Amino acid sequence: MTRLSLLALLALAAGCSDGAPAHAPPERIPPKPAQEGLLQIAEGSRAFVTTTVVSPDSSGALLQAPARVAFRDEAIARVAAPFAGRVVTVHVRTGDTVKPGDALVTLDCPEASSARTAVLTATAALRESQLAVERERRMQEQGVGIERERLAAETRLAEAQAELSRAQSASSFVGGGTGSTLVLRAPIAGTVLSRNASVGASLQPGGEPLVEVGDPSALWVVAEVFERDLPLVREGAKVQVELPSERGPLSGQVISVGTVVTAGSRTAPVRIHLDTSGAGMRPGMFGRVRIEATDAGITLPAQAVLIRNGKQLVVYVQQDSLTFERRTVAVAQSVEGRVRVISGLSPGEKVVTQGALLLDGAADQLL
């Protein structure tokens, strides 16, 4: 190696050892991922999103429910055979109009004869006991009677009275007539809805009704309201009833709210009295009702509620000018474009009421 080469190597080594060591540039820290359920939008998109401060709806809201037309409790009677027997005559046909006391079916029942005989026997025994008591009292007044015999006569009288009362109660279904003939009569005025009796048929007590009578002028509407909405329904609340047979809605009011919830449908009956019955109303008709709620709570336009994954109901709540939180909510059925929020929101929060689909393109609207 020449002297010139050695000097060059020394100079290079000195250059590497002098001065501060070189530093590598710092690694780039990635941005923190957005919190789950939060969404930020660009400033230019804000104009397409409208928010509304939610608060309890003091004006109330409408609850919608399916309903049916039905007879009132006292407006339908099902007449069955009180004793075993045989049908002799059927006096009515389906659709006939009857008055209280009109004959429906005549039966031949041996027990009816026995019941009438028991009443006659008990009546005679009572009369005999009354005479015996009167005789014992007169004898005591004359000084020839015995107290013990008078008391025994009064005891027999009390027994005879009790036996007559029992016989009369047992024959209360027999009515007038003699022998084994028993006539079933209409207990109310109305129309014969069904007839299940035929001449010569044998009957047993406790069987299906032979004749069903209903008063078509005494009807009400029974709505099936979901259990979650029952606290919002009160007696006297105004109702609008829609029936296929009527040109327009019928007005009415709630007269009773059911206390038992059906296991399968989770609904309870709400009975509604109509201010004016429709001319085309018939028992068994189906329709819909709209009931004024007493306290609607928070309500939103239906378009504010989105459906994610086919089942999750969500709304978007504003956190700041450009940040929105996805919130799961539970809502009642949509009525006239608005829904009642059962849970998930508090008064005073700002909810996106227009443009929610711009925030969540993968969701569907509730409507």
Image (cartoon, rainbow, N blue to C red):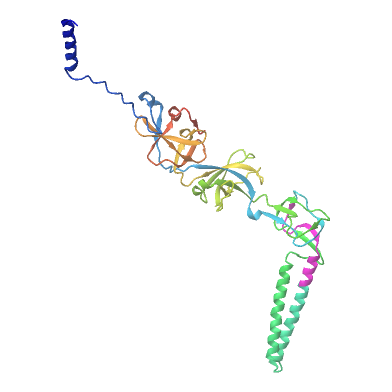
Q: Which quarter shows the N terminus?
A: top left
Count of numbered circles in the view: 0
Q: Residue furthest front?
A: 1
> Is 138 on the left or on the right of 260, as rendered?
right
- Residue 137 seen in the figure: no
In the rendered structure, does residue 114 fall within the stretch colored magenta? yes
Please state which of residues 9 and 256 is positioned toward the viewer in this rendering: 9
**Measured along the vertical axis of the image, is residue 141 above or below residue 305?**
below
Residue 110, position as x, y percentages in the image: 81, 65
Residue 340 lies, with reference to residue 193, above or below; the image says above
- Res 285 seen here: yes
Name the spot of residue 326 as percent of width and height, x first: 42, 34
Q: Position of residue 263 (x, y in %)?
A: 58, 49
* Residue found at x 72% / y 81%: 130
Q: Is residue 52 left or right of residue 148?
A: left
Q: What segment is highlighted magenta in the picture?
A: 97-118
Which residue does the image show at 73% across and 81% down from the upper left? 129
Is 225 located above or below residue 48 in the figure?
A: below
Q: Is residue 102 above or below residue 310?
A: below
- Whether the magenta-drawn stretch holds residue 333 is answered as no
Q: Residue furthest bottom?
A: 143
Which one is nearer the viewer's eye here, 187 or 11?
11
Q: 61 or 367, which lies in front?
A: 367
Q: Which residue is drawn at 79% across and 71% down?
A: 117
Percent x, y for residue 357?
A: 46, 29
